[in-house]
Image (tube, grey):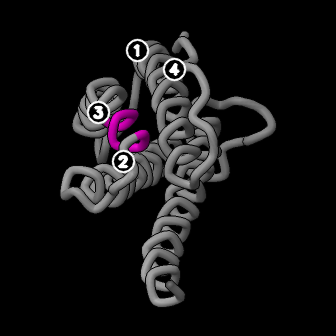
Amino acid sequence: MLTQTKKHAIPRAQTRSLISKILEERKDVLVLLCKVSGLAPYPASKPLGALMTEFCELLVDYIAAAHFGLYQRLSEGQERRRAVVDLAMEIYPDIDRTTQIALAFNDKYGGVTLSGDLTALHRELAHLGEVLASRMDLEDRLITAMLGESIGPARSAA
């Protein structure tokens, strides 16, 4: 019995470590999103182009950490709890949609020189912020389930 408990403790510890990494990257993405958007209390500490490059790199890192950490673990059958697997299957299409939007944003703005009228950029940053908020709500539901807490009802994404 003790061996079985230790066997499950290691993957759960790895899961917790991965979740902590994802949550830390998420926080960093949100801070940089506020900076590149010019929102208070995060004044730009670098030129917008440099901030945008840093933001896009971190955005891709965050998306990849979730994809190759959480979702790959689930798709490879490493998760045995049916409720977690069912939830992942339910939300994955929406997560994938947010991934595609974030990657398209990166392809458009990552590493480019920004100049002229930035109205379109600000509009797309606002949309990306909404998309990320929706993604984070979905991820929170999955993380809660993976940590063994109750799943709760789905929240509608604004």
Residue lying at 29% horizontally and 59% vertically, measured from the top left: 73
**Image coordinates for residue 138, horizontal then vertical, percent:** 48, 31
Could you tell which of marks 3 and 1 lies nearer the N-terminus? 3
Q: Amino acid at mark 2?
A: Ile
- What residue sits right under mark 3 in the picture? 89
Q: CA distance from mark 2 to mark 4?
A: 15 Å
Magenta-highlighted residues: 83-88
Q: Amino acid at mark 1?
A: Ala
What predominant SS class does the magenta segment belong to?
helix
Residue most extreme to the right? 41
**Image coordinates for residue 107, horizontal then vertical, percent:** 22, 37
Could you tell which of marks 4 and 1 lies nearer the N-terminus? 1
Could you tell which of marks 2 and 4 lies nearer the N-terminus? 2
For the residue carrying disc 2, how many other residues have a C-alpha within 10 Å: few (<14), some (14-19), or many (20+)?
A: many
- What residue sits right under mark 4 in the picture? 130
Residue most extreme to the bottom? 3
**Image coordinates for residue 52, horizontal then vertical, percent:** 45, 43
Q: Mark 4–mark 3 contact, CB under 8 Å?
A: no
Q: CA distance from mark 4 to mark 1?
A: 15 Å
Q: CA distance from mark 2 to mark 1?
A: 23 Å
Q: Amino acid at mark 3?
A: Met
- What residue sits right under mark 1 in the picture? 120
